[in-house]
Structures are given as structure tokens and as C-alpha cells.
Amino acid sequence: LGGGGEGEGGAAGEAARRELQWAVWLVQSRVLTVQGADGRGHKLLIPWLDMFNHRASSPHRLAGRTDGMLRVLAGAPVGAGEQVEIVYGTSGTSNAEFLGHYGFLDPAAAAADEALLRAHPHARPLLKQTALADDEAVLAATEPGSHEALALG
């Protein structure tokens, strides 16, 4: 990653750090935790599976995360050329999780967001400290490509 002999604090070190953060985010956004025969969760990259987009109301689902027989099950007829979407997570998956794991927000996760806020009431006043325009200004002022670093912290 990077290189160039400028040391960890130089431009090459910073470029390497950004490349590593991007690579980590890329893997984390596509990895799937599957229960192994040992009963433990194993994070796997499974070719083609990351091509299924999320839609909360999709009748199709991913099965086999606990029996080792991973498959996408059609919950309704699928026509030729029709996009097949699956549901990421559960009805309890919040936008904090969607954003952290997949890099998007889902308006259908509002109930899960409210449950998260009820579980962490101290967060509500902190969220009110800035307006959406303030948050967008911070993102606009950051260097292009560094938004992953903000998400990874």
C-alpha cells in the first residue's frame, strides 16, 4: 500500500492509510456472517451474493446462514430480466447499522431507529446539537474520498 519512502507521517503514508481504510470498508460492506459447523459466526466474502440489492419490502430472502446451504429464496414469481432484491438484516435493523455495514440509509428502518433511540436516550440531545445543513457542510468541506474515513472513525 502506497510506499515511496516518505515515512508514515508523509503524503505516501497518508495515501496508504486512506487506501487501507477504503479496502477495509469495501470488504466490510460485502462480507456476510455465516454460522459454521463449530457454531461460531464466520465472516465470508461470497461471490455474486453482494450483487443483490436491499429492499425492505422484498418478498425474496437469503437463507442458509446457519445450515451451511446459502441460497436466495424467491418469495414471489420472478420474471425474465426482473431484478431480485433481498432484505438485509431484520425489521430491527437500524439505519446506524445500514450505514455502518452497507453505506446507505433505508427510510423503512424508522421504527428500528426509534427503538435504538429509546435504548440510548442520552443520544437524542446530542443529535440535536447540529442541523442537517451543518452535517452536510462538514461532508462538503472534507476531501473527496475521505467520507469513508469519517464513517470508519
Image (cartoon, rainbow, N blue to C red):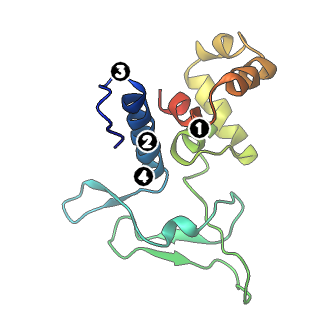
User: Label 4: which residue?
Assistant: 27
State which quarter of the image contains the N terminus.
top left
Secondary structure, mark 4, is helix
Distance between the alpha carbons at the discs numbered 2 and 4 = 12 Å
User: Label 2: which residue?
Assistant: 19
Please tell me which of labels 1 and 2 falls first in the chain. Answer: 2
Distance between the alpha carbons at the discs numbered 1 and 3 = 19 Å
Mark 3 belongs to which amino acid? Gly
Mark 1 belongs to which amino acid? Gly
Rendering coords of residue 100 (x, y %): 53, 39
Tags 2 and 3 in contact by the CB under 8 Å rule? no
Mark 2 belongs to which amino acid? Glu
Q: Is residue 36 left or right of residue 94?
A: left
Please tell me which of labels 2 and 3 falls first in the chain. Answer: 3
User: Label 1: which residue?
Assistant: 145
> Pointer 2: residues within 10 angstroms few (<14), some, or many (20+)?
some
> Pointer 3: residues within 10 angstroms few (<14), some, or many (20+)?
few
Q: Closer to us: mark 2 or mark 3?
A: 3
Q: Closer to us: mark 1 or mark 3?
A: 3
Up-down relation of residue 28 to residue 110 (above or below): below
Q: Closer to us: mark 2 or mark 4?
A: 2
Distance between the alpha carbons at the discs numbered 4 and 1 = 16 Å
User: Label 3: which residue?
Assistant: 9
Rendering coords of residue 55 (x, y %): 69, 60
Please tell me which of labels 2 and 4 falls first in the chain. Answer: 2
Secondary structure, mark 1, is loop
Distance between the alpha carbons at the discs numbered 2 and 3 = 15 Å
